[in-house]
Amino acid sequence: MIIPARYSGGAILAPGGISFPVAVAPREQAVAPDLTSAVYTTDNELLCVDRAGVVRWRRAFGTFQEKARNVQAGCVFSLNGKTVWLFRPDAMGHWNDSNDTWHVLDAATGAVIASADLDTAGHGGHQHVHPGGTDVLLDVGEGQDGSSLFRGRLIGDTLEVAPYSWKNRVLVALAVDGHQFMTVHHEQDDVAFHTYPDGEVVIRVGVADLGYDEDAWLEWAGGYLDADTAVVVAGGEDDDEERFRHHLIDVRTGAHLGIFDAHTQDAYGVIPVGSGAWLTFDDGVFRHHVR
């Protein structure tokens, strides 16, 4: 499984009290499936560290930037932990004179195995590893221009990239068994559930279906609690203060199953781990919950 990772108090943390000290606060981080190493991005490079915080390898992005403003490079381990996938928003990061790029690195050495150019100019990209182990989905956020979704697969020393046709949906999560994925519209007015890998929409749920008026919105958050149930997060304003509620949706029918007590006030605080269980992360501590 993909190990949840969060940064707090000078270290990258994983459930079970696992920690990886780091010298600077990461822009994004990931922990290897065997819990022996972690990777993280900074303004200018990708680093791999062991559990003592010793740097195993590092890879610079290109031309040094004093501060990479409004951009964030992203990293994730493959399901088997043998590779690290790196998304670089090069167009806006100015490390290189190029469009955005996607790379697959050897997790043991940091050597680049394969790379691909993307026709995007993103602020950042979120990568989701498919449970099947071969594919990685990359959602590139391009601000007011929307969001582009790509499916990547490493074949030998080639990164094969297949784009999805839309630019108005944000990838939120993959189903536990990989048969579906979940997106929220860029304008945050509905959530959709798609077949994998073709992306056909089978269920669409709007804010009105959850009992809200047109002033409410859906956050780009949530995920699959189990194979048949997803968590979605609705937002609204009450006395000029934003409030969020978690809801459950039957992904087979689109039925609203009611409000979900997520044990967190953070709209992005639910970390599903399958079989009806989820984690929250508060004050530097992962907490496990079961329905």
Image (cartoon, helix red, strand yellow):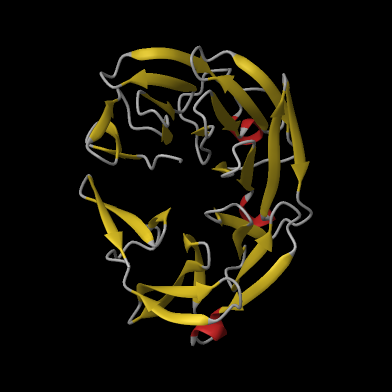
Residue 281 vertical position relative to residue 241 in the rendered view, above or below: above
Task: Tell me the residue at 72%/19% (across/down).
Answer: 157
Q: Nearer the viewer, residue 123 or 82?
A: 82
Task: Tell me the residue at 42%/20% (across/down).
Answer: 48
Residue 35 vertical position relative to residue 1 in the rendered view, above or below: above
The answer to whether one can see residue 51 in this image is: yes
Q: Where is residue 134 drawn, in percent x and y?
A: 64, 36
Residue 138 vertical position relative to residue 96 in the rendered view, above or below: below
Task: Tell me the residue at 50%/12% (across/down).
Answer: 109
Quadrant in which residue 280 is drawn: bottom left
Q: Where is residue 126 drawn, in percent x and y?
A: 55, 44
Q: Where is residue 211 drawn, in percent x and y?
A: 49, 87
- Quarter of the image with the N terminus is top left
Residue 207 horizontal side relative to residue 36, left or right: right
Residue 5 vertical position relative to residue 203 in the rendered view, above or below: above
How many numbered marks are there? 0
Q: Where is residue 222 drawn, in percent x and y?
A: 46, 62
Quadrant in which residue 132 is drawn: top right
Residue 58 horizontal side relative to residue 184, left or right: left
Q: Nearer the viewer, residue 224 or 146?
A: 224
Quadrant in which residue 89 is drawn: top right
Q: Nearer the viewer, residue 133 or 246?
A: 133
- Quarter of the image with the C terminus is bottom left
Task: Tell me the residue at 32%/27% (across/down).
Answer: 24
The answer to whether one can see residue 215 in this image is: no
